[in-house]
Image (spheres, grey):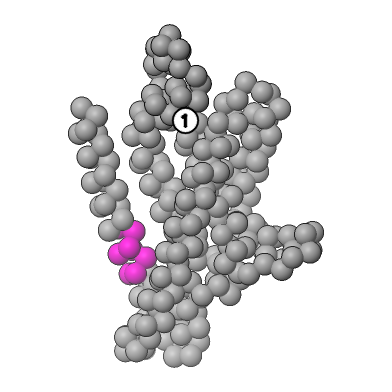
Amino acid sequence: MSYQWDFSPVWRNAGPLLEGLGNTLWLSGWSILLGLALGLGLALLRLSPSRIASVAALVVIEFYRNTPPLVHFFWIFFGLPILIGVSMSPFTAALLALSIQSGAFFAEIFRGGIVSIERGQWEAGRALGMSEARLMRRIILPQAVRRMIPPLMERSFELVKTTALAATLAYGELLYRAMVIASQTFRPLEIYTAVAVIFFSVLFLASLGMRRVEHVLRRGHR
């Protein structure tokens, strides 16, 4: 029996799908920003001369890098309110889960980029009387960021795709809207195919943009 494809439900429900895409990008954007800030902080703690701070950061990083993100979604949404006595919206729970886990991955990228800078750069900055904070801000991080762009970009793309797990919390992102529409139209193949095309299009265009940024930074560095 041949399957008769019908994409008309996709066009009829383009509005809700685009609204879901907007929610996906909103969640992704905030998760990436918070994850980058948290990742940089964890990386600096990981490189701290304080053994307590370094070990504490390592525990957080390894725990979140080696546990499933879906567990974090459920635990933060259902478990954390029990501990703190405050209910949490699906968006807030998804944002916390994605930010913390992405922060753990970003931390290792930051740490790798920082330690890849030649020791002579550190010694030259200290010889000029720079504080560690100024040395990091003016010399080390600008060089390290150029090396970190590809892995940061790759991880950010993974985060965007992971936002689909927010559908399990009934947050109205793209996949959740697709699930609702598929259940109403009985056309799951067409709806989920459209979701795949939308994700591909967004991430492919973002990839082209990031490659352009990377090229400009490299050319400016030369």
Give the residues in magenta: 197-204
Q: Quadrant of the N terminus?
A: bottom left
Indicate whether residue 51 is drawn in magenta.
no
Q: Is residue 42 left or right of residue 164?
A: right
The residue at the point 74 percent across, 65 percent down is: 86
Q: Quadrant of the C terminus?
A: top left
Indicate whether residue 202 is drawn in magenta.
yes
Residue 201 location (% of width, % of height): 30, 64
Does residue 214 lie above or below 161 as drawn? above
Does residue 128 lie above or below 31 as drawn? above
The residue at the point 26 percent across, 44 percent down is: 213
Residue 194 location (% of width, % of height): 35, 75
Circle 1 packing at 10 Å, graded few (<14), some (14-19), many (20+), is: some
Does residue 127 lie above or below 28 as drawn? above
Foreground of the two, 203 or 81: 81
Principal SS element in the magenta part?
Answer: helix
Residue 96 location (% of width, % of height): 60, 56
Q: Is residue 105 visible?
A: no
Q: Is residue 13 left or right of residue 97?
A: left
The residue at the point 54 percent across, 65 percent down is: 165
Q: Secondary structure at mark 1?
A: helix
The residue at the point 53 percent across, 41 percent down is: 39
Foreground of the two, 85 or 7: 85
Amino acid marked by disc 1: Gly
User: Which residue is under mark 1?
Assistant: 112
The count of marks equals 1
Does residue 15 lie above or below 59 as drawn? below
Foreground of the two, 178 or 52: 52
